[in-house]
Amino acid sequence: MHVSATTASPAGTGADTIAVGVFSDEGVAHDVDGGALGALLDSGEARTAFRHLAVAHAGGLRWLVVGLGERESFGPERARLAAHAVRARTAELGTLRLCWEVPHHVADDVVSGLVEGTLLSAYRFERFKADRAEDDEAASAELEALILSAHHDVSAATTRAVVVTGAQNAARDLQNRPANDLTPAALGDRAAELVATIPGLTFELYGREQIERMGMGAFSAVAQGSATEPALIVLRYEPTAPSGPLLGLVGKAVTFDSGGISIKPAGGMADMKFDMSGGAAALEATGAIARLGLAQRVVTVIGATENLPSSTAVKPGDIVHAMDGTSIQVDNTDAEGRMVLADCLLHARELGAERIVDLATLTGGVVTALGSVYAGGFFSDESWAASVLAAAQDSGEIVWRLPLHDRYADAIKGRYADLTNAPAERKAQPIAGAEFLHRFAGDVPWAHLDIAGVANDSGLAYMGHGGTGWGVRLLVTLAEALVAGDGAAAPAA
């Protein structure tokens, strides 16, 4: 879909359908000749209630009157939802070129929300479909163009939204691919594609033997059960005029998680392809940061592997060593993500990361606690926590802070090793997982985002089913804040 911004009037954009939003207690800002839009409101067919839609025809064009509700409540998230409602109706109407008349006196993040909601709603994953059913909504009409018409220049907000949403949809593509297609090596191939097309990006790819030689015994232990080659993917973005601390992004990318010998129940096993969602978000966010040309330096470390049971798989009770020599007793092979991330966090620190965010579908417990609304957030530094939480709020990918505490840290002490990957008492599982990772973050200001509840089937109307690409918008927003000097946390004491 081609997306553009203009200061031309909506009727002069070449669109066949024009969406006009109306706030409560406000009329249509620019009615058509004959007052057809106002008449729809007067008749009650159109309403200002949020997401209510009515159609009018005037001047050879189709007009959608969109209820936006109260002006003070209309922010970026409501803009995404309104854009989805319009996009769904345009599919029914056969629209090819849609113009949104940007509501007067709204911030640029609302403009971004209109773009994001449209592009996220229009996303389809059809890589493995030979044909689409004739009655499929997506088959009825696919938007060819989205135009944002405003009195002032909104091209910067529009361009940013296109880049970031494109990256989010690319992450969704990675998530939705099955594990026999999206292998660790295939994830590395995607990194290579980004590097080949975006200036300032470089990457390195390490296989099983190199991972073992680097001393990543925790990562290697997870990978040893599968004949499929694991991959340690390291990307660097070096802008021409760098600013701010080196941001480390760390992603869990278990491309299929059977649970290993501590095997999961069969129900829902097919969705374990989504266990690479953190790695997908970190990868595509890095690409978006570079594509936008932000001055923020980034080093991204992604641990990609399968977790399978076999004669070579790590066994419950085995003791392995992380890159820094920490011994880990593997009491549950299904608590594998924290083992992969332990070595990845250590490697990010080794590469000089001065701030770290890790993303992982780490625990089912966070889904029980927070559902699909918030990701769970854990932080080692108050200033860094404020920065990440602000980016979460601004991006619409919201995070609920959960605690770290010495008593939780005591729970992960091992009986026969320094740490256990799964405390015997199955209490506070998301916090236990976070405390395990906390041990490997060291003194670097660190954030852990447990995204198990928000990575797929989030329940948001504009997301539909499948992968959500959650985290891409948050990470880009965070990088922008760092460049602006709004996220420069002091090193932890």
Image (cartoon, rainbow, N blue to C red):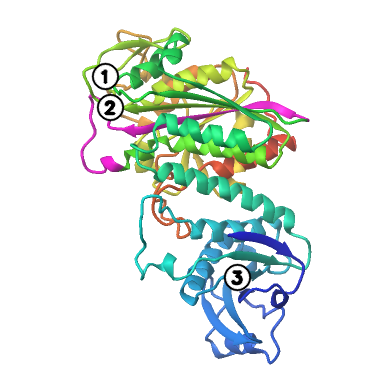
Task: Please provide the residue range marked out in magenta.
Answer: 241-270
- Mark 3: amino acid: Arg
Foreground residue, 473 or 385? 473
The dot on residue 308 is 2
Is 267 magenta? The answer is yes
The dot on residue 313 is 1
Q: Quadrant of residue 146?
A: bottom right
- Mark 2: amino acid: Leu
Could you say where residue 309 lies in the image, as x and y percent from the top left? 24, 25
Contact, mark 1 vs mark 2 (Cβ under 8 Å): yes
C-alpha separation, residue under disc 3 versus residue under disc 1: 54 Å
Tag nearer the camera, 3 or 1: 3
Quickly name the residue at label 3: 97
Tag nearer the camera, 2 or 3: 3
C-alpha separation, residue under disc 2 versus residue under disc 3: 48 Å
Foreground residue, 486 or 111? 111
Q: Is residue 53 visible?
A: yes
Q: Residues within 10 Å of mark 1 (few under 14, many from 20)?
A: some
The structure residue drawn at horizontal position 62% and vertical position 31%, both measured from the top left corner, is 384
- In the displayed structure image, the side of residue 295 where residue 415 appears, left or right: left
Q: Residues within 10 Å of mark 3 (few under 14, many from 20)?
A: many
Contact, mark 3 vs mark 1 (Cβ under 8 Å): no
Quarter of the C terminus within the rendering:
top right
